[in-house]
Image (cartoon, helix red, strand yellow):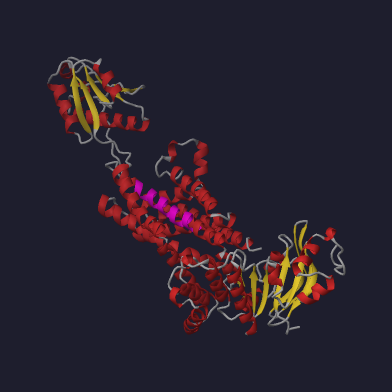
Amino acid sequence: MTSLRGLLRKEFFHIRRDKRTAAVLIALPIVQVMLFGYAIRTDVDNVRLAVVDPAPDSATIALRDRFAAARVFRIVTVVPRIQDVDSLFGSGAAQQAIVFYPGFADDLGKGVPAKLLVITDATEPNTGSLLQSYAQSVINQWASGISEPGRVSGAGQATGVSGGGVVRPAITIVPQVRMRFNPTRESKNLFVPGLMAFVLTIISSLMTAISLTREKETGTMEALLVSPLRPWEIIVGKVTPYLAIGFISVIAVLVEALLLFRVPLRGSVLLLLFEGALYILVSLSLGILISARTSSQRVAMMFALLGTMLPNILLSGFIFPLESMPAALQVISYVVPGRWFVTIARGIMLKGIGLTYVWRETLVLGAMATVLLVASMRSFNERLE
Amino acid sequence: MSDLAIHVTDLTRTFGAFTAVDHITFDVKPGEVFGFLGANGAGKTTAIRMLIGLLQPSSGSARVAGYDVARDTEQVKRSIGYMSQRFSLYEDLTPRENIRLYGGIYGLTRDQIRQRTAEMLERLGFSSVADTAVRSLPLGWRQKLAFSVALVHRPQIVFLDEPTSGVDPITRRQFWELIYDAASRGTTVLVTTHYMDEAEYCDRVSIMVAGRIAAMGTPTALKGEFAVESIDELFVRLARPDAGGAGKAGRVQ
């Protein structure tokens, strides 16, 4: 075992001496959390709202105040004519417009359907539909506030959503919507599990593949193979440091997300770390497999990027929701380890669920780890022939 | 048989339809410096890889330090040292760390490692650069260090695969002094080289052509047998059999 210890120490020397890589390994998780926490957000905030109010009355002003008070919206301008809206959208000064018709308060008072038009810039479809529902919920809340019991039936009429980003909001029907687990619908609560998968993929798959192929390139791998070290000892010696770094990174990402962004962690930390370890094993095996099949660092890097990073970013549900993908891609996502890990981690962190709910996903990850480990060891041994 | 360092009988390795090593037979005595010559693609590297346990033979047998290379790979690996032309040092580690790493890998105790490190640095005159990254040492120094590191566990036999390629003549000469030094202490040396003048330094040489051993013997005997001025001339003659009579090298086809 002394020989294995020497090998481990040497690998840590490599990491420490390669200042740039070491810096990347340490900074990557921290910077990524910052980036996703502050910059890359799918929440909509600070929406530039234009109001078209040809004949202001008590009701339009009250509703306008509601929008002004909502954290999400910022009223950029109030114009009298609907024609002005085009140029506002064109220049990007407005993302959304609320268009009142004359006699809004009167209609409400009389119990006639009060008309209101919500126009949304839908160049970005996801943001567009998000804005629609935000605006609708503001209107609904306001409407439910003014319609006391007994007056509800006469308050207005539902016309629902029509195409082209135009909405005639319902005032009669006030749907009660509760968002569970992430009531504020903040994307920062969602990104942390995906980010852990991403960071682990880089450290485990990419770094393992590169560090193993580097030894092939420089010829030192041959020296190790000629030595009495057994192949598994070489692999363990090469891979353990990255396992440790990966584990530390997971903890760093978690701590940073908890402290800085107050992301909830409702379930068991231990279970989360266990699942993290399982995911690291899967990623490491992929890295070993890649290195066994390639002989240069460059090729290994390409394989690791295309074969592990991209799928884990695109097909794990980390950024793009799997539910809205074509069926074929959803099927492919079943073989992406990140998909399972992200599901598990989100469940544990946001829903606070335990193994009783994620045992299936855990089993899949476990099976992947086993199959890939065996395949990578076999592949590594084969290359000795 | 056990008093031979290397004993090879009809060793063969095929890759699909291609026969890289074709029934080679030779012995190397303990303490001998044996030159293993051949053009690129003649099968030298494949033969060496079988002898050091990296490649399974297709047929035939080879015993290294008394152990069968196909069955007792573990013991073979403990008994040999190996240095390839892409020498096996870690360039971001210092000489001291490299020695300690390989000492550890070969199961030396901490005291042994400390003692041999001091001894080795002293002999090479490397004490001043013991803690400098290997990367910043001149090529010749690195090669000498790699050779010493390959001997850190005092193997009975050391395999050197083109150890001197790309090195200036003075460093080559110094390198050969190290080889002789090791041989004088009883280490058997099997060395491949492209430099035919180096072949003259060997106790015995074999010349491989197309997977077979075309000629084998002491440099002097071979020159006499084939009536050539130098091993260089012999090598060219054997590598291109159509250019001249094959003489008594009956095994060449």
Quarter containing the C terminus of chain B: bottom right
Q: State whether residue A188 is above or below residue B186.
A: above
The spot of residue A31 in percent (x, y) is: 33, 51
Asked if the stretch drawn in magenta spans residue A205, the answer is yes
Query: Along the horizontal axis of the image, is A171 left or right of A313?
Result: left
A94, A159: nearer the viewer: A94
B101, A57: nearer the viewer: B101
Q: State whether residue B237 is above or below residue A346.
A: below
The spot of residue B141 in percent (x, y) is: 53, 71
**Magenta part of the protein: which range?**
A191-208
Q: Residue at x 49, y 77 (%)?
A: A2
Q: Quadrant of residue B201?
A: bottom right
A114, B239: nearer the viewer: B239
Does the image show residue B9? no
The spot of residue B62 in percent (x, y) is: 74, 74
Q: Residue at x 41, y 55 (%)?
A: A356
Q: Quadrant of residue A133?
A: top left
Query: Along the horizontal axis of the image, is B241 left or right of A65?
Result: right
Q: Residue at x 28, y 27 (%)?
A: A95
Type of secondary structure dominating the magenta stretch: helix
Quarter containing the N terminus of chain B: bottom right
Query: How many labels were placed on the picture?
Result: 0
Does the image show residue B111? yes
Taking the view exactly as shown, the residue that stands out farthest to the front is: B229
Query: Along the horizontal axis of the image, is A163 left or right of B145?
Result: left
The spot of residue A109 in percent (x, y) is: 15, 19
Q: Residue at x 50, y 59 (%)?
A: A211
Asked if the stretch drawn in magenta spans residue B10, the answer is no
